[in-house]
Image (spheres, rainbow, N blue to C red):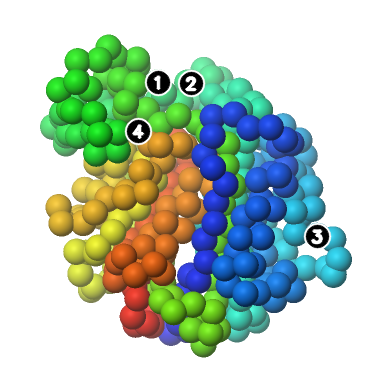
């Protein structure tokens, strides 16, 4: 099956902040994102043929929080809308399928989450195995430390490698970072992304519509998402087979020497694991946006990675890019999207 040419044409997100005012339905964060996209693309709300959101009722602490978020769009006229209980990156995939079906030529996906309004670790622990892990109420940083220790013991990376990731993001010398105390051994403060509140939105369009809206559409050349076992003891935590498989499918026979890679990593070692799984050469600029390490905004961090990768092409800063989004504990679910300034089609 040949998928028609589809491109990202717009991206907007609210600031990634540790605490924000407003409700947990994301309306206050989403309205500015939508208004920015309307203005950038010269479109109106009614031009969007399909809307899809990604969020979590568990995080919001209320049932059907995504319905309340529709207030940011407007009740009239009615819209064609759907929702996933996942990061907004998976909402974008559903929107992509909708455009690929030929039903609409313009779609918008958004994700939102307010981590500051809930006990994040309690919420995230509910993603784990309900029989053997969830009853322990594991702290997300403790699970991250388990994965980091597995990678260090396997020789997949070193603490200096982890510090180098943080140094690129913060500008702090590696030696200074390594001198800091451990927070969750072997993780130091710089290895851990802070939870933040934010919303993000991405607009995609058919090739013809995309060329009408922007000068440099970011054409989607490959897309796949895969999942590993939820049983931590059933997989090697130092590697990410699902990322590797998704990457193989998304890249196909194209070069992996892309200009930019946006990787969703809640910990420094996760970036190293994903880079290795994607087999990216050292020439690739990784997370020029700062990545999730500057703000782990649940349910929009993955969508932001796709948005930033596309923005690099839309702005003319890159010709090719790859974006990675993750869901679940310890890189359980992984999505890979490849993008290019040149329309190549996708099989």
Q: Going 33% across and 80% down the picture, which residue do you hit?
A: 342
In whole angstroms, how far apart are the C-alphas of marks 2 and 4? Answer: 16 Å
Q: On residue 267, which mark appears?
A: 4
Please tell me which of labels 3 and 4 falls first in the chain: 3
Whether the residues at callouts 2 and 4 have beta carbons within 8 Å, the answer is no
Where is residue 218 shown, x and y percent of the image?
41, 72
* Number of other residues with Cα within 10 Å of mark 3, as a class: few under 14, some 14 to 19, many 20 or more: few
Drawn side of residue 78 relative to residue 230, left or right: right
Whether the residues at callouts 1 and 2 have beta carbons within 8 Å, the answer is yes
Q: Which residue is mark 2?
A: 138
Please tell me which of labels 1 and 4 falls first in the chain: 1
In whole angstroms, how far apart are the C-alphas of marks 3 and 1? Answer: 41 Å
* Number of other residues with Cα within 10 Å of mark 4, as a class: few under 14, some 14 to 19, many 20 or more: many
Image height of 305 relative to 10, above or below:
above
Q: Which residue is mark 3?
A: 74
Q: Which residue is mark 1?
A: 142
Q: Going 27% across and 19% down the picture, which residue do you hit?
A: 186
Where is residue 311 shown, x and y percent of the image?
42, 63
Q: Quadrant of residue 173?
A: top left
Q: Quadrant of residue 318?
A: bottom left
Whether the residues at callouts 3 and 1 have beta carbons within 8 Å, the answer is no
């Amino acid at each position: 099956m040949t998928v028609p040419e589809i491109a990202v044409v717009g991206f907007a997100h609210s600031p990634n902040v540790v605490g924000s005012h407003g409700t947990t339905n994301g309306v206050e964060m989403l309205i500015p994102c939508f208004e920015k996209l309307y203005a950038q693309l010269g479109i109106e709300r009614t031009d969007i043929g399909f809307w899809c959101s990604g969020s979590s009722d568990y995080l919001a602490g209320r049932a059907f929080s995504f319905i309340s978020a529709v207030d940011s769009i407007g009740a009239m006229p009615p819209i064609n809308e759907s929702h996933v209980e996942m990061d907004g990156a998976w909402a974008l995939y559903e929107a992509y399928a909708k455009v690929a079906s030929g039903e609409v030529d313009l779609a918008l996906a958004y994700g939102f989450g307010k981590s500051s309004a809930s006990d994040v670790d309690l919420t995230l622990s509910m993603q784990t195995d309900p029989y053997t892990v969830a009853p322990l109420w594991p702290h997300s940083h403790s699970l991250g430390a388990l994965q980091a220790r597995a990678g260090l013991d396997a020789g997949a990376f070193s603490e200096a490698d982890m510090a180098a990731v943080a140094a690129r993001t913060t500008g702090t010398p590696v030696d200074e970072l390594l001198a800091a105390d451990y927070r969750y051994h072997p993780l130091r403060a710089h290895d851990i992304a802070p939870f933040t509140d934010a919303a993000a939105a991405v607009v995609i369009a058919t090739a013809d519509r995309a060329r009408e809206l922007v000068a440099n559409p970011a054409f989607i050349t490959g897309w796949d998402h895969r999942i590993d076992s939820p049983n931590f003891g059933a997989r090697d935590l130092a590697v990410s087979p699902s990322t590797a498989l998704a990457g193989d499918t998304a890249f196909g026979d194209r070069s992996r020497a892309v200009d930019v890679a946006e990787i969703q990593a809640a910990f420094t070692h996760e970036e190293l694991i994903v880079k290795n799984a994607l087999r990216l050469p050292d020439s690739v600029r990784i997370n020029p946006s700062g990545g999730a390490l500057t703000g782990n905004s649940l349910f929009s961090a993955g969508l932001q990675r796709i948005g930033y990768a596309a923005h690099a092409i839309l702005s003319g800063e890159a010709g090719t890019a790859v974006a990675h989004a993750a869901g679940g504990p310890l890189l359980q679910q992984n999505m890979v999207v490849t993008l290019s300034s040149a329309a190549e089609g996708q099989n």
